[in-house]
Image (spheres, rainbow, N blue to C red):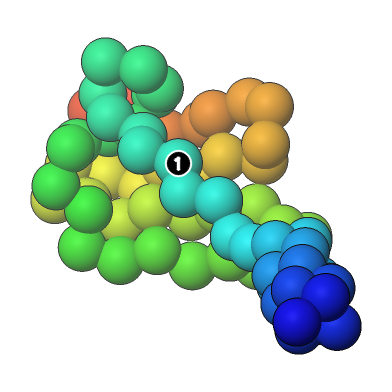
Amino acid sequence: MKKSIVLFLIIFLTGSLHAQSINNYTTSNSSLSNDTVWSIEIDSSDNKWFGTSEGLSIYDGINWKTYTTANGL
């Protein structure tokens, strides 16, 4: 029984180390151009690109930049 518990804990803890986190970005807590996101891409530099009906936003983990026709970008 002890071996089963130890094995379970090892498997559980190993799996937890590789768990993913989920972040909920909205226009109220970020510079996302719109709350309705149609596409997301993560590039080779780990930048997150968000495509919305009102523009394209990029998040590098610290800073946001939004490209829209309104700001001329």
Query: Is 19 left or right of 34, judged from the image as shown?
Result: right
Residue 17: quadrant of the picture: bottom right
List the single residue furthest toward the front.
Answer: 1
Q: Disc count in the image?
A: 1
Identity of the residue drawn at 33% across and 25% down? 71
Task: Name the spot of residue 47 as percent of width and height, x first.
Answer: 65, 53
Task: Name the spot of residue 73 as percent of width and height, x first.
Answer: 42, 37
Q: Dot 1, how many residues are within 10 Å of its Cα: few (below 14), some (14-19), or many (20+)?
A: few
Identity of the residue drawn at 20% across and 63% down? 38
Provide the secondary structure element on which disc 1 rests.
Answer: loop
Task: Name the spot of residue 36 as percent of width and height, x first.
Answer: 14, 47
Q: Which quadrant holds the N terminus?
A: bottom right
Question: Can the viewer see residue 22?
Answer: yes
Question: Can the viewer see residue 69?
Answer: no
Residue 28: quadrant of the picture: top left
Query: Is 31 left or right of 55, judged from the image as shown?
Result: right
Depicted 10 relative to depicted 58: above or below = below
Identity of the residue drawn at 52% across and 31% down? 65
List the single residue furthest toward the top.
Answer: 28
Depicted 25 relative to depicted 19: above or below = above
Depicted 40 relative to depicted 33: above or below = below
Depicted 24 relative to depicted 30: above or below = below
- Amino acid carrying label 1: it is Asn
Q: Nearer the viewer, residue 65 or 41?
A: 41
Residue for badge 1? 23
